[in-house]
Amino acid sequence: MNDADTVRDSSGAPDPLDLDDFRRNGHQLIDWIAAYLEGLESRPVRESVEPGDVRAKLPEAAPESPEPFEAMLADLDDIVVPGLAHWQHPGWFAYFPAMSSPAAILGELAAAGLGVQGMLWSTSPAVTEVESHVLDWLVDLTGVPQAWKTTGPGGGVLQMSASDSTHTALVVARDQTRDRTRAPAEEMVVYASSQAHSSIEKGARVAGYGHVRLIAVDPVFALDPLALEAAVNDDLAAGLTPAFVCAAVGTTGTTAVDPVRTTGEIARRHGMWLHVDAAYAGAAMICPEFRHHQDGLELADSYTFNAHKWMATNFDCSIFWVADRKPLIETLSILPPYLRDSASETGAVIDYRDWHVPLGRRFRALKLWFVLRSFGAQGLRSMIRTSASQARELAEWLDADPRFEVVAPTPFALVSFRHAAGDDATRALAEAINASGSSYVTPSELDNRPFIRVSIGSTWTREHHVTRLRDLIDRVG
């Protein structure tokens, strides 16, 4: 169809389903995205925006007539971009990375273009089989137990976030404990360190657990196994039922590493489900030198990490592995007549609708597949190692300067420090860094005292961006 053939309504507006327009608009959008990424360094990491500023630029009502794509593209520049925190900025050192890459963007675009629904194998076989195969690749690439492959008793599935994975594990553990002990959920106990992610408490609440115990940590902020054992024994004496324990490999606060093996041994003794939360650091296991941090994984019942944090894949893309998929499927499978089909009944296929709470699911694996093929394992290892090296160098520099205090180890690529002059000086330093426009960090608290988190690993961060941050700290500290 050429321009002369374009279907237009009575107002002369183009047909929103015209594929020639789509092709032209798509080229413009890719050019816009490339220009946005190229120009990020010239922008402040976080735009100056107040509550309501973005909505004030939007019309009161939706348009009655079609608008040209050029107007939408202009509004990206005029309305959207000025209201963003630029997570892809090379000066983004806040929270954890929210990585993206050209390969991931194109994979996401391809998935959107295909527009398929992967709830059952039969509703789009490629969605299921690419996902299963790519997650089996990652078993080999990250050194987790071979039994977690879909060719074994376990298997992997992509979820939206690590929180979803954790919530799913909590539900399965609840049902397994109830089947084994006949205890009601209100009498079950969930255990995690005081540094564990908030998704543990939230998931336990959603799943109906009656008790959550946040266990004391050791001097490097990792879960204390003796404190865990004591808490379990106290709950048993009180007539409660230990059900679930989470070991974190890289906590959100400081990337502390809980002792997976010892925690798993305690879980085995007391019949608890062991879930390993490696949401951030799991990507680092593609490098063999980091794998000692998760010794004992053969004791785990479930494990999660986010490819969208530190594996060049855009949100959302969270890997969830189980050692045995049977309890997962038994807990989550509900089979109305409209979901029955001959392929499922053979038992020869995976129906991922039984592996998480939602029925519908999109083709998340496509962007991960694109990333693994575009970077290769070597490229991803180099990316991880570079970030970790930059973080170690920054930590060593801070440690050598008497003005600053490094408050936690740097096992991966997060540096945690505070100002030696006290809490007010720490807060002022964080504010000065974030006011610079060139770098952005996350202030947090540890033992009721403020500290600063510097998370290195944004896709576009290079050595000179870390050096610029260090010079800024030196200047304003």
Image (tube, rainbow, N blue to C red):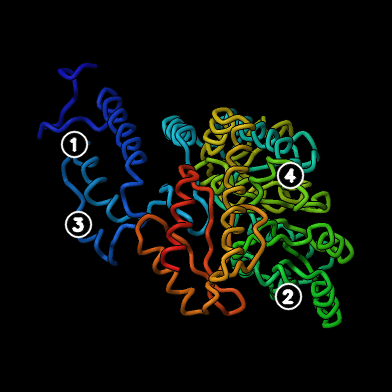
Q: Nearer the viewer, residue 400 or 178?
A: 400
Determine contact: label 1, label 2, CB under 8 Å. no
Residue 256: x %, y % from top left: 68, 62
Count neighbours of disc 4 (C-alpha within 10 A) and say few if under 14, some if 14 to 19, many if 20 or more: few
Kind of residue indicated by mark 4: Glu
Circle on res. 289: 4
User: Which one is in front in this view, the residue at disc 3 or the one at disc 1?
Assistant: 3
Q: Which quadrant would residue 289 be assigned to in this image?
A: top right
Circle on res. 216: 2
Q: Which residue is mark 1?
A: 68
User: Left or right: 227 with respect to 116?
Assistant: right
The C terminus sits in image quarter: bottom left
User: Left or right: 49 with respect to 450?
Assistant: left
Distance between the Cα atoms at labels 3 and 1? 18 Å
User: Left or right: 18 with respect to 397?
Assistant: left
Q: Residue at x 57, y 49 (%)?
A: 390
Determine contact: label 3, label 4, CB under 8 Å. no
